[in-house]
Image (spheres, helix red, strand yellow):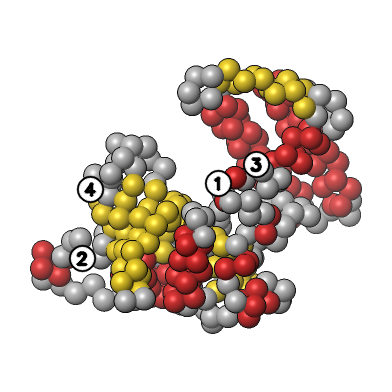
Amino acid sequence: MNSAAMDSVLTAKLQEDALTLRAIVTSKSKNTRSAIAHAKVKMMQEVHCILTLMLGPPPKPEAKFNWEYYDAEDKYHKVSKTPLELAKELSAPSFTRSLGGADVNELFSLVNDPRNPYGKLLTVDRLGNVIGGRPITFVNVDMDTLKKAAISMLKAGLPAFFGCDVGKFSDSKSGIMDPALYDYDLAFNISLNMNKSQRLKVGASSATHAMLLTAVQIEDGKSVRWRVQNSWGESVGDKGFFVMADEWMDEFVYEVVVDPTFVSKEVRDILHTEPIVLPLWSVCPIIIDVCL
């Protein structure tokens, strides 16, 4: 059984468990709390069993484990570390050399969600799925603020992760992302005039894909076009790179992940405010593993 099959089994089991827990809650039994606690213990034991059978027993925090693998150049590597040592290395600046030594734990999301007020911290009800984990929040700003932060990152030699609606007015073969790419008005004799806020409200657009901003062309102090590195391999665009028009960014880019040093103090201070909680059915403006 491969990892995809393991994921499928785990997903099916967790979905079944969720229905079981809901049934216990709605039964309104006098022993509901104890029944839930007992059920969760059994469920976690079953999940642990599946993972152990598939991946082997997890090492103790201070016991070394061996990890053998081949890299992209087919070179053999063997790592022998404790889980604690590995966790420490993964968060060390030397490990994030592609970010110029920036601390990835300090990066945060700027979003452009015109449905909601700018200069506010946002989150979505029930968005987080890790108990005790870092809350998932994002600072809502206008596009000018978002672009300036991205440009500052690029000038410092740092790529910028961003989330967008990749399927709109883009061509993967040529690697072009431009709202002028297709003329639907001419083709169908109609007008499509929804703005960014309206498209979000009706679900016509959302953040569907994540890529990297790797360069920007500036003319007369303003961004004109952006170089984007996609993750679909070298068979698309120009060996995996796309060109994004600045107008496309305005309409279909929703998130840029930035280092706090590349935004103003006013923006950084928003991170310490109480977030506005959007309803769980709200179209999510950020790219994460589980979104609504």
Check residue 180 in the rendering and tell me which mark sits there, or answer none. 2
- Residue 183 picture quarter: bottom left
Q: Nearer the viewer, mark 4 or mark 3?
A: 3
Check residue 174 in the rendering and tell me which mark sits there, or answer none. 4
As measured in the structure, the alpha-carbon distance from the residue carrying label 1 to the one carrying label 3 is 8 Å
Q: Amino acid at mark 2?
A: Ala
Q: Earlier in the sequence, mark 2 or mark 1?
A: 1
Q: Indicate the quadrant containing the N terminus: top left, top right, bottom left or bottom right.
A: top right
Residue 82 horizontal side relative to residue 55, left or right: right
**Which SS class for mark 4?**
loop
Q: Indicate the quadrant containing the C terminus: top left, top right, bottom left or bottom right.
A: bottom right
Q: Is residue 192 above or below residue 81?
A: below
Q: Amino acid at mark 1?
A: Ser
Q: Is residue 147 above or below residue 235?
A: below
Q: Which residue is mark 3?
A: 95
As measured in the structure, the alpha-carbon distance from the residue carrying label 2 to the one carrying label 1 is 34 Å
Q: Can you see residue 5?
A: no
Residue 73 spot, x, y in % from top left: 48, 23
Could you classify mark 4 by the number of other residues whose Cα lies within 10 Å: few (under 14), some (14-19), or many (20 or more)? Answer: few
Check residue 26 in the rendering and tell me which mark sits there, or answer none. none
Q: Earlier in the sequence, mark 4 or mark 1?
A: 1
Residue 239 horizontal side relative to residue 127, left or right: left
Q: Earlier in the sequence, mark 2 or mark 4?
A: 4
As measured in the structure, the alpha-carbon distance from the residue carrying label 4 to the one carrying label 3 is 34 Å
Residue 235 spot, x, y in % from top left: 29, 36
As measured in the structure, the alpha-carbon distance from the residue carrying label 4 to the one carrying label 1 is 27 Å
Residue 198 horizontal side relative to residue 129, left or right: left
Q: Which residue is located at x 57 percent, y 51 percent?
A: 99
Q: Which residue is mark 1?
A: 98
